[in-house]
Image (spheres, grey):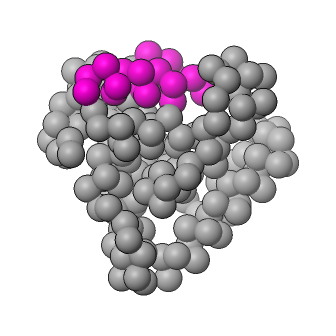
Amino acid sequence: MITRTQAIRLLEEAGCAPNVIKHCKEVASLAVEISVKAKAAGNDVNLELVEAGALLHDVGRCRTHGISHAVEGFRLAQSKGVEPEVVEIIKRHIGAGVSKEEAKELGLPEDDYFPRSLEEKIVAHADNLIKGTKRITINERLELMSKKNIPEYTVQRVKKLAEEVERISR
């Protein structure tokens, strides 16, 4: 599994801005906290996978800050030989997922971008709770999404993911 040091080096070598790297570190910190709680509650969570995926979730922002950063990051990490499980976290971290139909509308390769594994869900949720480098509540995230005129079904999807992750990490 790619280590924390290797993941940070990959972010730097890819050309990610310092603020993006700080954001990734904050997401990783929160994702690991959530994972430790989930593990204590009896869930089988791979902490190393969560940390690696969270650190690299925004590696695609070295190429674009649009929604396609997930696909760009997926391709970049894949080309660098990063483990498939980590690469999938990068691909599936946007919001609470994107359907094949939505992907097509957004100009992404037609694919399913929904987080499936517990580790994918934890990273996506943790990312939703970090704005820049500041932790926010799920309600603050939902409010920000509503202000940006993000479709209500997407807002509800993020809320549902939050409820699921919070339920398993109690």
Tell me the quarter of the image containing the N terminus: top left
In the image, taking residue 74 as reference, residue 56 lies left or right, namely left
Q: Residue at x 62, y 69 (%)?
A: 164
**155 to 61, vertically: above or below:** below
**Residue 83 higher or lower than 168, as above or below:** above
Residue 53 visible in the current orientation? yes
What span is in magenta?
A: 63-81
Q: Is residue 68 left or right of residue 62?
A: right
Residue 69: within the magenta? yes
- Position of residue 166 relative to residue 54, above or below, is below
Instruction: Tell me where residue 41 appears, x and y as whole percent.
Output: 42, 83
Q: Nearer the viewer, residue 56 or 144?
A: 56
Which residue is rendered at x = 44% and y = 43% of the image?
Answer: 89
x and y percent of residue 127 in the render?
50, 49
- Specify the quadrant of the image occupied by residue 56: top left
Q: Residue at x 54, y 40 (%)?
A: 92
Count of picture labels: 0
Give the residue displayed 48% in from the left and 76% down from the top: 169
Q: Quadrant of residue 139?
A: bottom right
Q: Is residue 126 visible?
A: no
**Front residue of this view, candidates 86 and 144:** 86
Where does residue 130 sit, x and y in percent of width and height? Answer: 49, 51
Query: Is residue 45 on the magenta stretch?
Result: no
At which x and y percent is residue 161?
64, 60
In this picture, residue 66 sits left or right of residue 82: right
